[in-house]
Image (tube, rainbow, N blue to C red):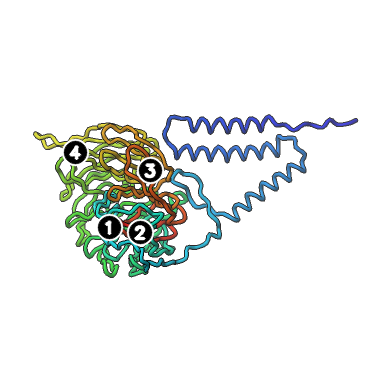
Amino acid sequence: MTLEKKSIRLWPLYIIVSLAVLAIIIVWLMDAGHRQDRVMLTQMILIIAAILGIVWLMVLSRVNWRIRLIAFGVFAFTVVSFAALFRFDGFSGDLAFKFEWRWRKATQRSVGSLDTQDTPTHLLTDFPQFLGPNRDATVTNIKLNTDWENTPPKLVWKQPIGDRWSGFAVVGESAITQEQEGEWEKVVCYDLLTGQEKWTHKDRARYYTPLGRLGPRATPTIDGERVFTIGSTGILNCLDFDTGNQIWTTNIFEENNAEPPPWGVSVSPLVYQNLVIVSAGGAVAYYKETGDIAWKGQRAKSAYSSPVLLTLAGTEQIVLFDHGLVTSHEPTTGELLWEQPWPTAVECVAQPTPLPGGKLLVSTAYGIGTKLFQISKSNQSEKFNVNLIWETIFLKAKFTTIIYYKDHVYGLDDGIFTCLNSVDGTRKWKRGRYGHGQTILISDVLLVLTEDGKVVLLETNPASHQELAQFQVLSGQTWNNPALAGNYLLVRNNREAACYLLPTM
């Protein structure tokens, strides 16, 4: 009697593949606007489909057992080899899994040669805090030569640096940032022109989560002879600018009975007159000489944005974008001037952007988008009014700050560069996938530091997306804000830092 050979049972595999394809199509056609959620769901669908595919092979396929075992062995060998060769390196700005070689070559210190006849003009100005002199990601005192093919930027130095997402603050020839080394959170002052370390202050503190990863996030603030820093766990330091010696310190969350945000503290201190203002369960002001609390503002759950000094409706005020709430306080007393609710199911990171005429632009990613508010004041009651002018889903700023220039706003919409008409919020164009990077306006040119470590120059052109120049400045994921001190461009990520001299007109 001859046994009939059974054919391979393919229909379960067809169902698995079809359902996976259908699920991915549904995910990307959903009218949700959550690119990050879509990426995560797509990855999970592919992982589940792969697991079901192995189950089909081993249990349902009717394939010869020798072939099944060989196929499973190849699969297992591939997984083990991948794990041996690569290590998990967190997530991209879109929440895609990132891996790197376990034997990644470490950055080697290098120094550029600037002693040539075609060396660009050296200009040196201060960039003393997060997003520059006015905390608006705008530099107006230089004009770049954008012909980088014939007059390229010059490397001043490049070298390894500690974790993670802090930027540089620059005064004179001192460039100060924060980084992680083992169990120590450090504030480090480098020589701008050489990259050599001038001084280091250390605190025993360490922030780490598998998603948030390791290290400090905030940019230092330099004010005269003092440096103010906030570490990833909430340690506020006042340090001597010349030596790094600690003058006073406190933990802003412990002192104010507040919960730090889950992805690490990224608030950069704001100095106003004799106060240093932070976010710890809402706005809090400290006397910068003593570290004593001067005032506490409206209580709110802390987010990732930093306080900023703005003049709206003819009144100086401290604006802070906390979780689920935009607030404004009188700078010297902390009196609440106005507040504006914001959807609570998203992370608030991008800085609010002021527009002429008492308008304020606020944006988040995760499907929310951008809203433009009119801030006005009643002549009779002196009460502030906040009215929505327009809102759009076409600009969702996750990490980046939105730039205003001549009746248009420019920024990264879920990683793609976008221009909107500031009058009505209509989109002019969307092009250039730069990831979740950072942007500075340099007079009339936009400098974009992309998520993968490139510098791109863009025209401020509302008619079309026009790239002027680009070059690779760093390797690896780059979320840190760049600093521009004169024409010295300082860039860094969680691995390396570099200084370039940009050509000027």
Q: Give the CA distance from mark 2 to mark 3.
A: 24 Å
Q: Position of residue 427 (x, y in %)?
A: 34, 34
Report which residue position mark 2 lands on.
490
Up the image or down, 146 lies above or below 407; here it is below
Tag 4, which secondary structure? loop
Up the image or down, 229 lies above or below 283; here it is below
> Could you tell me if the residues under marks 2 and 3 are in contact, i.e. CB atoms within 8 Å?
no
Q: In which quarter of the image is the N terminus?
A: top right
> Could you tell me if the residues under marks 1 and 4 are in contact, i.e. CB atoms within 8 Å?
no
Report which residue position mark 1 lands on.
127
Q: Position of residue 443 (x, y in %)?
A: 27, 50
> Could you tell me if the residues under marks 2 and 1 are in contact, i.e. CB atoms within 8 Å?
yes
Side of 163 where 487 appears, left or right: left
Q: Kindly identify the amino acid type of the residue bearing the numbered disc 1.
A: Phe
Question: Residue 171: which quarter of the image?
Answer: bottom left
Q: Give the CA distance from mark 1 to mark 3.
A: 27 Å
Return the residue nearer the eye: 116 or 478.
116
Q: Residue 466 carries which label?
A: 3
- Residue 171 visible in rendering: yes
